[in-house]
Amino acid sequence: MIVNSNPTPCALPTDSMNVKRADFPLLTSILALLFSALAAVPGAGKVLTAKQPNIVFVLCDDHRYDCLSIADHPFIETPHIDAIGKQGVWIKNAYVTTSLCSPSRASILTGQYAHNHRVVDNYHPVDPNLIFFPQHLQAAGYQTAFIGKWHMGGHIDDPQRGFDHWVAFKGQGTYWPDGHGTTREVPQTTYDGFNVNGKRVPQKGYITDELTDYALQWLNQRQEDKPFFLYVSHKGVHADFVPADRHRGRYDSQPLPIKIPTVKEMSDGKLPMWVRNQRNSRHGVDFGYNMPDFSPSVYYRRYCESILSVDDSVGQLNQYLSDAGLADNTIFVYMGDNGFQFGDHGLIDKRVAYEASAKVPLLIKAPGSIPAGQEFQGVFGNIDIAPTLLEAAGAAKLPSEDGISMWKSLCSEDQRSPVRTQLLYEYYWERNYPHTPTLHAVIGGRWKYIRCHGLWDRDELYDLEADPGELNNLIDSAEHQERIKQMNHDLWSLLQETKGDEVPLLEDRGPVFPWRDRKHAPQASFPAEYYESR
């Protein structure tokens, strides 16, 4: 019930209205009963200027920016994800600030860079004193639910602050409870089923479908008189990729649409030595996690097939909202937690600041607020999700955030002045995966500047318009030295403005992997420049 806290005074009866003074005691009693009843209504006395929107946030694991049919992909079919962008906005310059599962998820929930929330690997939990943005949604009257992959703190899957309803699994979980279809058990693979509001419940089927069922079940059982926030965090499409049985083999005849550079091309392009060395490791396309029969083409096909069930999930959730009459008052957000490489720069996996790793799909619709087919100009980071959704909900801001609310910009048809034109990227060296150094970068615009920390090696500068594959490093180019100087200044300004000029150090956790395993994979071709000419 919406109650005006400053109601227009009711006209008291007068003799001219032919009401007898003897009737006043009765009227007074009726009014007293009425105001007593109103006082008992939760929220009475609050000024609600508009109906609060429901929010559905779907996070897909390892979904790179160009694996959408709306992005002119040569064969993948994602009609339901595409529809979000067509009915709202497809943000083409969306990035994560750290391309790794746990740091990116922590940035989404806190609105902070990794150097502030300090979740810089996949093994440490987030500080219990940090506030998650769903806590502010709860304070604004929202009922909240988390369904899926938590993955902050190793095997932690206990119910977390900010969520009234909870369904999660430990670590990476598994696609199928019996593990079928799995080619490699990634670190933190678990077969412990789900934690449903503090109780263990066995997993029954394919993970993407089962998480969708849990989400739909909660939507059906929620309190209908309160706005809701639903966070669906899919395991799919994390490596190793296991598509649903109904999708397996769908793309068997499709070629790899990614051009894998030769070692010579990487050398000629002046890529840093650490990148070329990483190619000669388990994160190199020639080794493929040391799997004996690794094929980037087959790996990519299974990846694309795994995305199809996530698209199905989005379709089911949107269908529910439509059938329930909720679609017109629901903000629907689809996002990837980071990208993934399939031979880009001779590498697989993520962590690096290149487009295939750091750039993600982000599509948002909000009927009546965001114009359909909106062309969003500017850069949107994962740290901007929390402030944006809080403003959209009319909730209070987080006490400490690095992100910016993009809500007004999303809703405006005037896109001449983007809120953000560049973003800080950061990755901190992990002993578990020593192939990638500590990196900082300025990303989001035409020019990308990458600075490695703690290595005697080249930094990087790329012109993404002329070189979208980032294979021509211009760091030594005489004509770009002023640009490099300015972007280095921008980098340090971004770090200092957000108190990021110290490297977070955490104790070692998790396994340490060898550079390569000679028993399982061939060694990559040795760069010719390493040989001394006589």
Image (cartoon, rainbow, N blue to C red):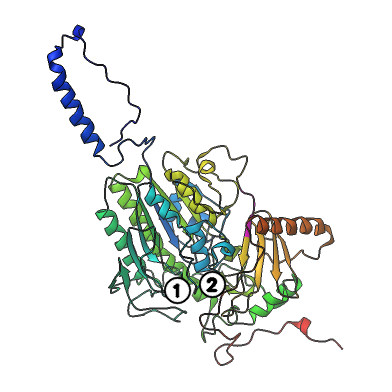
Q: Point out residue 370 in the picture as x, y percentages from the top left corner.
A: 47, 42
SS for tag 1? loop
72 drawn magenta: no
Q: Residue furthest bottom?
A: 519
**Whether label 1 touches label 2, CB < 8 Å:** no
Distance from disc 1 to disc 2, alpha carbons, whole Å, reads 21 Å
Which residue is tagged 2?
Answer: 121
Q: Point out residue 201 in the picture as x, y percentages from the top left corner.
A: 27, 72
The answer to whether 141 appears left or right of 183 in the picture is left
- Is residue 390 shown above or below 165? above
Which residue is tagged 1?
Answer: 241
SS for tag 2? loop
Tell me what residue is drawn at x 33 percent, y 30 percent. 4
Dot 1 amino acid type = Phe
Inspect this view and state whether residue 210 appears: yes
Tell me what residue is drawn at x 52 percent, y 80 percent. 509
Dot 2 amino acid type = Asp
- Answer few, some or many: residues within 10 Å of disc 1's Cα (few below 14, many 20 plus, some between 14 and 19): many
Displayed quadrant of residue 169: bottom left
Q: Residue furthest right?
A: 534
Stretch in magenta: 420-424
In this rendered view, identify the residue nearer to me: 461 or 470.
461
In this rendered view, identify the residue nearer to me: 371 or 533.
371
Q: Point out residue 126 in the picture as x, y percentages from the top left corner.
A: 48, 66
- Is residue 99 shown above or below 110? below
Tell me what residue is drawn at x 46 percent, y 76 percent. 240
Dominant secondary structure, magenta:
loop
Tell me what residue is drawn at x 64 percent, y 50 percent. 421
Displayed quadrant of residue 272: bottom right
Displayed quadrant of residue 3: top left
Q: Residue furthest top?
A: 16
Q: Point out residue 2 in the picture as x, y percentages from the top left corner.
A: 31, 35
